[in-house]
Amino acid sequence: MISADIRPDLEPYYTQELDPKNLAPLWEVLPGIAKKSPESACKSFIWHYENLRETLLKSAELITAEEAERRVLILENPGMRGRFRITTALFAGLQLIMPGEVAPAHRHTQAALRFIVEGSGAYTAVNGERTNMEEGDFVITPAWTWHDHGNESNEPMVWMDGLDIPIIETLDATFAEKYNDKYQVPSRPEGDSLARFGSGMLPVDYYEKGTVSKVFNYPYARTREALETMRKAEEWDPCHGLKLRFVNPETGNSAMPTIGTNMQLLPKGFETSSYRSSDACVFSVVEGSGKSHLGNQVYEWSKRDTFVVPSWLPVKHVANEDAVLFSFSDKPVQLMVGVWREDRGNL
Ligand code: GTQ
């Protein structure tokens, strides 16, 4: 910034001529725009599940899912409090649905993922098809699809929501509406989408390349089995262990256009090499325990914890026992725009 001490003569031009005309001098702000590397308000942080579970369950005594519409505790990045986001571009929260409750049907232009953290037997319905959800399942509700959630089991159910709310807000493309009923009456049998689109096959004469996956539940049983089978080859990536990304089977692109999701296996004792990338990343611990060095901080984690890694911060994971990590980020957007970068150290 050009200091008023150095160029006091510019001041009258700024205040008397530019400001009243809604004009501003770029040269005063350019260093903050063209930065050498990302300088984000986003901070690293971990939410230990055991510290928040009671607090989350208490919300059910205070407000019903129906009254809340979505009973979610937002995971707010400590560097961006009040801005309801976990990274600069993405929202995350923990949603609770108690036995017998319904989170009423609605749709919006923001796309959502659900990653099941605790419980089993609740469902999400997307465009008339229900899917039963189990721990570790990755479920999507694409932009502008009707969706409602219900819990017909006897236990509370908790999942992590990941949404592209800040991206859609930046684009000023937010639309939403409520369904004319509390929930959608199923119009397709359960498992229909997965059978048609998620079995390594597609319906004959179906050649669409949609922007979003028609598979809307990627069951953990399948994901876990894939990782377990792959491990026999013992080809561990130094930075990622074994890491797979969830894809839209029509294209091989990410399941949703704005949010990329992954599942990775780190075997007991594995230490990853230092890695960083330009996509800030949210991790949910599915199995096992370990710790992650995020910059110069160390976070110990175990099952059901959530942690966030800001853009371009070096990461190293250490697994104390076999560990499985789910993660999501805005990487697909960065790839589409051509700005995504990674740094694999000296590898
Ligand atoms: O389940 O539809 O965490 O609309 C935030 C907004 C979840 C949902 C959130 C939503 C939903």
Image (cartoon, rainbow, N blue to C red):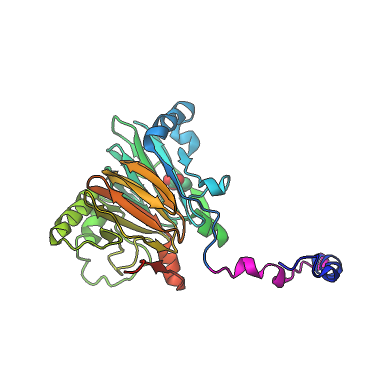
* Above-or-below relation of 54 to 91: above
Which of 195 and 329 lies nearest the eye of the viewer?
329
Q: Residue 257 in the image: x percent, y percent?
A: 40, 64
Residue extending farthest to the top is 61
What are the residue bounds of the magenta stretch? 20-36
User: Where is residue 206 shown, x and y percent of the image?
Assistant: 26, 70
Residue 160: x percent and y percent? 39, 45
* Residue 257 in view in this figure: no
Q: Quadrant of residue 123?
A: top left
The answer to whether 161 is drawn above or below residue 344 in the figure is above
Instruction: Using residue 50 as the reference point, say whether residue 17 is left or right of it.
Output: right
Q: Is residue 110 left or right of residue 133?
A: right
Residue closer to the observer: 192 or 8: 8
Q: Quadrant of the C terminus?
A: bottom left
Asked whether residue 28 is drawn in magenta, I would say yes
Instruction: Tell me what residue is drawn at x 52 percent, y 59 percent.
Output: 168
- For the point 35% across and 63% down, which residue is it? 254
Marks counted in the figure total 0
Residue at x-position 33% and y-position 71%: 209
Is residue 164 part of the magenta span, yes or no? Answer: no
Picture quarter with the N terminus? bottom right
Indicate the quadrant where residue 240 lies. bottom left
Residue 30 visible (yes or no): yes
- Report the front residue among 233 and 96: 233
* Relative side of 78 to 205, left or right: right
- Residue 88's spot in the image, x, y percent? 52, 56
